[in-house]
Image (spheres, rainbow, N blue to C red):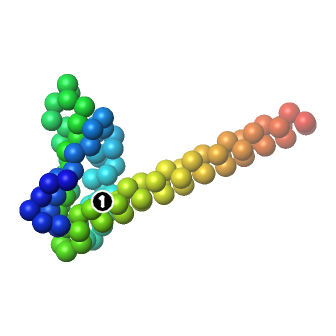
Amino acid sequence: MAGADDTCATFQFHEEGHTLGNVLRYMLIKNPDVDFAAYTCPHPSEDLMNLRLQTNGKPCAEAMDEALGNIIDVCKHVRKTFRKAVADIQKDTDTEMKQ
């Protein structure tokens, strides 16, 4: 993390690309404490993703931590919903087989 102060920073993620960059940018932009969030992947041969973040008072590291936590929460919800849907389909299939 490099920046002029706590409210403006650039984070560099190694071995990450557009998948994390786009999701992270989206989660950051949803935060009312974030003024600006954008990412770039410098070149396809470089396995890097740079994310620029500017907040309106909250430390960037705190906003980043919140966004990463929110992504984890969304992933947990998707996994739970998926598992329930699979269980429901299996239950329906088992019921149809018994008839």
The residue depicted at 18 percent of the width and 72 percent of the height is: 56
Asked if one can make out residue 18 in the rendered structure from this viewpoint, the answer is yes
Residue with the most extreme left position = 4
Q: Nearer the viewer, residue 73 or 10?
A: 10
Asked if one can make out residue 52 in the rendered structure from this viewpoint, the answer is no
At label 1, which amino acid type do we have?
Met
Instruction: Provide residue 15's location: percent of width, then percent of height.
Output: 30, 35
Q: How many neighbours does mark 1 have within 10 angstroms: few (below 14), some (14-19), or many (20 or more)? A: some
The residue depicted at 78 percent of the width and 37 percent of the height is: 93
* Residue 50 position (above or below residue 1): above
Which quadrant of the rendered structure holds the C terminus? top right
Judge from the rendering whether residue 64 lies leftward or rightward of residue 11; answer left or right: right
The residue depicted at 42 percent of the width and 54 percent of the height is: 71
Instruction: Provide residue 65's location: percent of width, then percent of height.
Output: 35, 60
Q: Nearer the viewer, residue 46 or 21?
A: 46
The residue that mark 1 highlights is 64
Judge from the rendering whether residue 45 lies leftward or rightward of residue 31; answer left or right: left
